[in-house]
Amino acid sequence: MIQVNDTVLYGGQSVCTVTEICEKKIGRETVRYYALKPVFDGKSTIFVPCGNEKLVGKMRRILSAAEIRALIDSLQNESLDWIEDDAERKEQYGAILHSGDRKALALLIRTLYLHRQALKASGRKFHAADEQILERAQKLLHEEFAYVLNIQPEEVPLFITRQLEATEK
């Protein structure tokens, strides 16, 4: 059961705090909503109808610090297969963004990052669509990790690198 002051992930919005459970009158009907405030963008409020299972299903609990460390440790030497076909890659990688699977997101980030580095080394450009997917995946994962670990989102890549290096020793 979701309560006021719970911190959750909501779809593509990343980390949100449940600020209230309120009722709003729409036409003749009164509907109960969860009011969510994105932690890293306090300007907006998201209203999720309590009775809409599909939308409420997009609200997921955040990981603990121990779960984040275990997730990072499980990434050692893993990545996703690169999909050559642009349309198929966009569809498959987009599905990962929507899945909320943190390990898949981390592997997606690693795969896109490594591909971007390889292209850069050979003097070629990274596709804009791939860059957008990478940025979105990083936003989702980095904001959750930053919130839980009490660091800034831009500090997350260094945290992950250090965690992986410590695991290798």
Image (cartoon, helix red, strand yellow):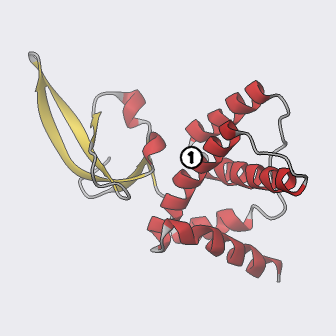
Image x and y of residue 6, in percent: 31, 57
Point 38% across, 58% down: residue: 40
Q: Is residue 94 left or right of residue 21?
A: right
Q: Quadrant of residue 70?
A: bottom right
Q: Quadrant of residue 95?
A: top right
Q: Nearer the viewer, residue 45 or 56?
A: 45
Image x and y of residue 46, in percent: 29, 41
Extreme residue toward the right, this view: 122
Q: Which residue is mark 1?
A: 136
Extreme residue toward the front, this view: 123
One can see residue 63 in this view: no
Q: Is residue 29 above or below residue 67?
A: above
Extreme residue toward the top, this view: 28
One can see residue 122 in this view: yes
Which amino acid type is marked by label 1? Arg
Q: Is residue 2 above or below residue 73?
A: above
Point 78% across, 51% down: residue: 116
Q: Is residue 48 left or right of residue 168?
A: left
